[in-house]
Image (cartoon, helix red, strand yellow):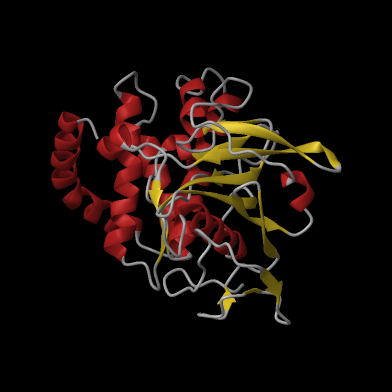
Amino acid sequence: MNFRPKNDSIALYGIREKCARSQGGAVKSGRGRSGILDLPVGYSMTSGGGLNIVVKDGYAESFDGFAMPDAASTADGESAPLGRGPLTQLALAGRPSERALVRRCVRGGVVGRLIRELYLGGRNPRPLEELRVSEYARARGVPTPEALAAIVQPVGPFLYKGALAVREISPSADLEAELAALKRPVDRETLARKRGVISSLGRLIAKMHGAGIRHADLHLKNILLPGEKGGPELYLLDLDRAKVHDPLSDFRKRSNILRLYRSVEKVNRRGKVITRTDLLRFVMSYAGESSQSARELTVRLGRMLPAWRLKWKLSDALGV
């Protein structure tokens, strides 16, 4: 995997020069300033219709004539579980049983109220960075939907709009919805399923941290549970703005866990969904996957929690 999360040389935004395939399988810039557009293995770049698209080999036909979806559109008019941005379903050419989900890049928080979908152009547009982190995560054994294309639409000389297309996992539900349905287990099978989901969540987050990945927006809606029966393998969603660290410090790992815990507290305000036993099960599973002491992890998280709760109250007051 040719992945360099920080010191890369790709300049996808605003590329207008012709590109040619080099012997090593990368895309060589006609400008020749940096020489190579460093794309993940198995991807190439195509341009047309005012769009620059980095697409997985074998899927270029599906994006012929592609038009950037509106930032307010969703899949079949409904919200689908794939992170914060709106979704549009896309049929895949030659694959009648498969579909892609295209998620527009949109801002959240205070800035998003002012500038929702425009980003400042540069060497590393957000859709491409997310695609690369996604491929890196999959290569390291972290389950996440397969990224099929990163799409960039230049807007004027300095700005762009972006989108990411991933293979749809169907049927599926986000973890918040799934846990809400399992809120009050009434039989052993349902209780066992909830325990399995919580344990799987701990292993997933530990795998992500073991790969050096820090998720920028880790909450229950950004965890996907496929609808198939059997083992509850979870998928990580929305790696937009995720960072790869070598290594990821223990403090950043705990901070990421507390970010997830914040979403647990928000859900529990609407009715007890996650119990103290569930939290302990998560910690035990995370610690087991990462070869840490569950007791030490619990103590350190407990020491950090008061300061983080103060930060969350401030964020809630500001509406961010």
Name the one closer to the observer, 251 or 87. Answer: 87
The image quarter containing residue 98 is: top right
| Residue in the picture at 44% in, 49% down | 156
How many numbered discs, if any?
Answer: 0
Q: Is residue 275 left or right of residue 72?
A: left
Residue 68 on image: x %, y % = 59, 39
**Is residue 165 positioned above or below 252 on the image?**
above
* Residue 112 position in % (x across, y down): 32, 36
Using residue 229 as the reference point, say whether residue 179 is left or right of it: left
**Quarter of the figure with the C terminus:** top left
User: Is residue 196 in view?
Assistant: no
Position in image of residue 174 (x %, y %): 52, 32
- Image location (x, y in percent) of residue 197: 53, 38
Q: From the viewer's side, name the closer residue of 98 and 117.
A: 117
Q: Nearer the viewer, residue 308 or 288?
A: 308
Q: Nearer the viewer, residue 77 or 155?
A: 155
* Residue 246 falls in image quadrant: bottom left
**Residue 28 lies in quadrant:** bottom right
Note whether 273 is above or below 224 in the view shown: above
Q: Quadrant of the N terminus?
A: bottom right
Q: Is residue 89 visible?
A: yes
